[in-house]
Image: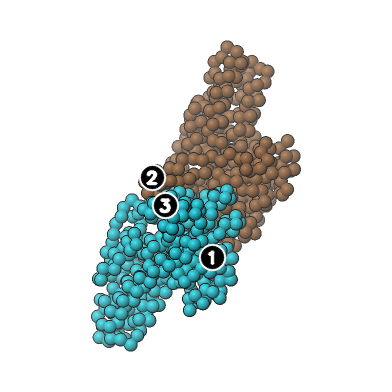
Chain colours: A cyan, B brown
Amino acid sequence: MGNLAIEWLGNKVKILDQTKLPQQEVYLELSDHQSIASAITELKIRGAPAIGIVGAYAIALAALKIEAGSKGGFLEKLRGVIETIAATRPTARNLFAGIDRMEEVAQADNTIEQTKAALVGEAIKIHSEEVEADQKLSQMGAELIEDGFTILTHCNAGSLATAGYGTALGVIKRAEEQGKKIKVLATETRPLLQGARLTTWELKKANIPVTLITDSMAGYFMSRGEVSCVIVGADRIAANGDTANKIGTYSLAVLAKENGIPFYVAAPTTTIDLSLASGDEIPIEQRSPDEVTHIQRVGIAPEGVDAANPAFDVTPHRYITAIITERGIIKEPYGGELKEMVL
Amino acid sequence: MGNLAIEWLGNKVKILDQTKLPQQEVYLELSDHQSIASAITELKIRGAPAIGIVGAYAIALAALKIEAGSKGGFLEKLRGVIETIAATRPTARNLFAGIDRMEEVAQADNTIEQTKAALVGEAIKIHSEEVEADQKLSQMGAELIEDGFTILTHCNAGSLATAGYGTALGVIKRAEEQGKKIKVLATETRPLLQGARLTTWELKKANIPVTLITDSMAGYFMSRGEVSCVIVGADRIAANGDTANKIGTYSLAVLAKENGIPFYVAAPTTTIDLSLASGDEIPIEQRSPDEVTHIQRVGIAPEGVDAANPAFDVTPHRYITAIITERGIIKEPYGGELKEMVL
């Protein structure tokens, strides 16, 4: 599963179409930045670290095709590409972290040909660093997991979301590899069912026992003492530790606190955004109401009913027991340590 | 809409098949207790007050058909009928409250023919009392609703669930009739989508603005100050005020408390079960995992994945701001007042 979700083929990127899972395993080979931008918007590829990686590859692929008489002309054309990629999804920090790195490489004092090669190299480096970060943070996070734990997770923060080992699921897999007996409760994660479709699929492949529940059942199991800890991924972590993640994460954090259950966020440092003082500043993507009124294209509500569809919510840092990154596990107060970790 | 959900036709019961809504309005005429028992189990008719009513009608219909040489023989056959009805669904108190009343009538010192007539009369009385209770509790509850409120509700506690005006939705409708401008956030209520299918349908018919959200979005809107209060129905209320209601209710109550939002339970006194000291004793129905792994018969998860499906959860009384009944609105400490209200 290691590198299955994203593969660099030199002149295109191969991705597993996550909208088709678990029924079909369909791979797409994308050779231009427009098709990658569409794949991100349509969630064919998703998960904060994963879209950071393919966003960088999209810029590299576009750069290879740019014909310009001067470096200035090259950069101007690249700017348009970057704007397209940046406009795909607003919440995940990793996308913008990747874009920032690609821009810095583009701006360096090099010829056009050197710059093209450097951009490809940087995208590959972003990819390999995310894979390595997963390995490290999974190893560190696994120390928090005890034999016999039942772990609740939300959405999908596994290999599919990160191109590597996974973040929340990476921690779970590593703990299992250490010989600990683990059970997982996976929330289905409406509206787009990443938990039901992707997390159960990944855990079954890894032979880790998983029970699917609706999002509304998490409190039931927590209140009965049947959850040892909660681990989720993250899309953006503000400087104070406030964390944006898939809609429903905030509710799980409040329920965990109310029931005295540790609530962990597992994310690479590329998810941390020191430019935002708190979670209030994190932009929340509002997606189409059709995703709520329909499930896999079947209508579930009366025709024409209004629906809201915020794709993420923000969990204030006071609900988060620890943030697990590849550089260490940190706890309240987050402010100082997060800064130290990233800078 | 008043009596649409359940109609007594003398020798059969007419119900609106709620599994077909909102796509189709299909009415069923059921003339024997077995078909009513199946309709309850399959949720063609649902909602605690509603199944209390049809459960009583089922017993009356069966009684009319019993041929027995003695009252003892009659009662023995009736016992089998009552066992079938009692085995349909375990959680809703109203079903057992109705059964208890029917049993008491059956035991009275009357001839078989008199008993048959009395049983029909008692079922009709249960029906009309529930309709009346809805009206009264809606009127009382509406006093808690202010002009401009955005009310979050879960599952369906409207006309469909009660055969009358509704409980949670009754309060909302009454407030709107009083000229208050109300907006409703309706949770879809996985797994069976009673919010998406039924609550939106009822509110659209009543011309009350409604926005559909997934269950996981409730916390998001509460944390942003966009919810004025939460109102839900109930399936069983223990002597201390602990309340069983549709799975996900507990989570909403915890989130409401965390965000300083009033959380109201609206239910007729037939939902109160003084025989249970606390919610720990309320039996929770576990339904088929297929309802979680499939949505309207379409599979959403890998083949063979395990799933849990508790249909209800228990909200401890400390999270409940007030319980609205047809005999008054009560608050903590619930113990004494609940007892006084029922006895």
Q: Is residue A172 above or below residue A71?
A: above
Picture disc at residue B304: 2
CA–CA distance in space, label 3 to label 2? 14 Å
Write the residue at 43% across / 50% down. Answer: A209
Q: Are marks 2 and 1 on the same chain?
A: no
Write the residue at 62% across / 27% down. Answer: B102
Q: Amino acid at mark 1?
A: Ala
Q: Is residue A284 above or below residue B85?
A: below
B165 and B262: which one is in front?
Answer: B262
Horizontally, is A84 left or right of B257 in the view? left
Q: Is residue A331 visible?
A: yes
Check if mark 3's residue and mark 2's residue have beta carbons within 8 Å.
Answer: no
Tag nearer the camera, 2 or 1: 1
| Subunit under mark 1 | A
Q: Is residue A140 above or below residue B23?
A: below
| Subunit under mark 3 | A
* Residue with the mark numbered 3: A208
Q: Position of residue B324 (x, y in %)?
A: 67, 46
Horizontally, is A295 left or right of B239 in the view? left
Q: Is residue B182 visible?
A: no
Quadrant the N terminus of chain A occupies: bottom left
Q: Residues within 10 Å of mark 3 (few under 14, many from 20)?
A: some
Q: Amino acid at mark 3?
A: Ile
CA–CA distance in space, label 2 to label 1? 34 Å
